[in-house]
Image: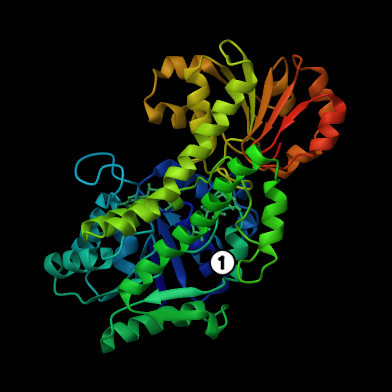
Amino acid sequence: MIKNICCIGAGYVGGPTMAVIAQKCPHIKVTVVDLNEKRISAWNDKDVNNIPIYEPGLSNVVAEARGRNLFFSTEVDKAIDEADMIFISVNTPTKTYGVGKGMAADLKYIELCARQIARVSKTDKIVVEKSTLPVRTAQAIKDILEHTGNGVNFQILSNPEFLAEGTAIEDLFAPDRVLIGGDVTLEGQKAIQALVDIYANWVPKDRILTTNVWSSELSKLTANAFLAQRVSSINALSELCEKTGADVNEVARAIGMDSRIGSKFLKSSVGFGGSCFQKDILNLVYIAKSYGLNEVADYWEQVIIMNDHQKRRFAKNIIKTLYNTVSGKKIAFLGWAFKKDTNDTRESAAIYVADDLLSEQATIAVFDPKVEEDQIQFDLNYLETRSEEANNKGVQVASSAYDACKNAHAIAVLTEWDEFKTYDWQKIYDNMLKPAFVFDGRNILDKQALEKIGFVYQGIGSR
Ligand code: UDX
Ligand code: ADP
């Protein structure tokens, strides 16, 4: 029976997942390690509200388990040495260099972890890949562990994460399914059972699926590709709706009531973001291409092409509506996170819309309830479109939405934060330049109420 778990990587996946395992399994000691000292000290902050990840319900779980059987530490070697089971939850960004640049996953962090595990381990261990990884990564981890290890036996499992940010705790408490892939050998099956036993502490057995390693890895990419495809599909229709006078919200409702289609993931938006969708599809495309399956690759790549188009189209529409120039104009951004209820900004549509508007010499004033100023500047600088100085000059970060909108020509809603709906929109209108425009990239505001105040309102996918 597993008594000691180590998780390498205290990020959006490792942090919440381990907090929930620790809360649900008080008999298991769970240590989450990370190289990033600042992140670990934030996880250990006396005030649980200061933990580095904003996720509804997470601070309560951490408050209950931390110090009891949940620990955060930078002592990676020690935690690896003590553990019977090691989760790898490090980041796997898209490669920014060399072969597969812009497509393949960069596995350098995973490889470093595998080498570290191989170097430190003195007893048998089950290694669980938790990060989103391309198919066949488990094999790479296995090769490293078997060839550089010290005679220790390793079993490698794939246990992809299906939690969505913003609802991570709900998703972890009551997952639709838990997927565990492992070897078909006797040892492989024993390792699978050890992980099944952990989840069985709170997840009904019929929701725990076991498969071979490749199926598990590929299922993760496929699930994200299907979800992203739905968003790109409805977004493709949003452009047609704008031209024809149909309303994409009405279309989504009508098709969503077909039980074969279902109502989820049909919200038209300025484009999907997040750390998974684009990365996973690019991985799928890269894998398909590497097997010479060009039609398969092209099919999935179109989901990304559509999403890029949707982001670009939103920025273009703002420019066109503001009389074909935004030079010197102030545009307020409500929201920077890639979705509500998270402080994560990876691949957020806001970054790309801001980048396009800055290239047109607009000034942007951002307000997001959970994202910090440094992160916003970091996201823009990462694109390397212009100097850091120019980004600093072009983007102000406001401490309230009211400040962001003061003397603005237009407002762009980039994240669907609930609080935006509760604002005093009359007050916002009174302090803006006229005509005052709202470009609702999330279709969350009340069009009729805003038009009554005097705003010129444009949502996505309707006139
Ligand atoms: C996703 C998967 O849902 C999750 O299972 C996986 O483990 C990780 O990737 P996440 O990226 O956290 O989760 O958020 P998700 O809720 O899937 O949203 C992704 C993006 O799509 C967001 O930018 C969201 O705003 C957008 N979206 C989602 C839409 O634009 N319309 C929709 O109808 C749904
Ligand atoms: P995710 O969304 O996949 O959780 P994050 O970037 O939020 O991604 O978290 C990944 C974490 O993994 C980061 O905090 C990073 O510092 C950590 N990390 C990466 N490589 C290593 C390593 N070799 N050892 C320990 N921690 C690592």
Q: How crowded is mark 1: few (under 14 residues within 10 Å), some or many (20 or more)?
A: many
Asked whether, in this view, residue 278 is left or right of residue 333, the answer is left
Q: Where is residue 300 in the image (x, y as percent from the top left)?
A: 39, 55
Answer yes or no: is residue 74 visible. Answer: no
Image-quadrant location for residue 418 = top right
Residue under circle 1? 172
Vertical order, 442 against 375 (above or below): below
Asked whether, in this view, residue 168 is left or right of residue 7, the answer is right
Image-quadrant location for residue 140 = bottom left
Q: Quadrant location of the N terminus?
A: bottom left
For the point 43% across and 58% down, the residue is 32
Residue furthest out toward the left: 147
Q: Where is residue 175 in the image (x, y as percent from the top left)?
A: 57, 71
Q: Nearer the viewer, residue 249 or 102?
A: 249
Question: How does the figure colour the protein chain or chains?
Answer: rainbow
Residue furthest out toward the front: 244
Secondary-structure class at tag 1:
helix
For the point 45% across and 28% down, the residue is 380
Q: Nearer the viewer, residue 236 or 404?
A: 236
Q: Quadrant location of the C terminus?
A: top right
Residue furthest out toward the top: 328
Q: Does the Cβ of the disc 1 residue fall within 8 Å of ligand 1?
A: no
Answer yes or no: is residue 179 visible. Answer: yes
Residue furthest out toward the bottom: 186
Vertical order, 319 against 173 (above or below): above
Q: Which of 235 and 190 is in front in this view?
A: 235
Total numbered labels: 1
Residue type at tag 1: Leu
Q: Position of residue 168 (x, y in %)?
A: 57, 59
Q: Position of residue 195 (x, y in %)?
A: 42, 78
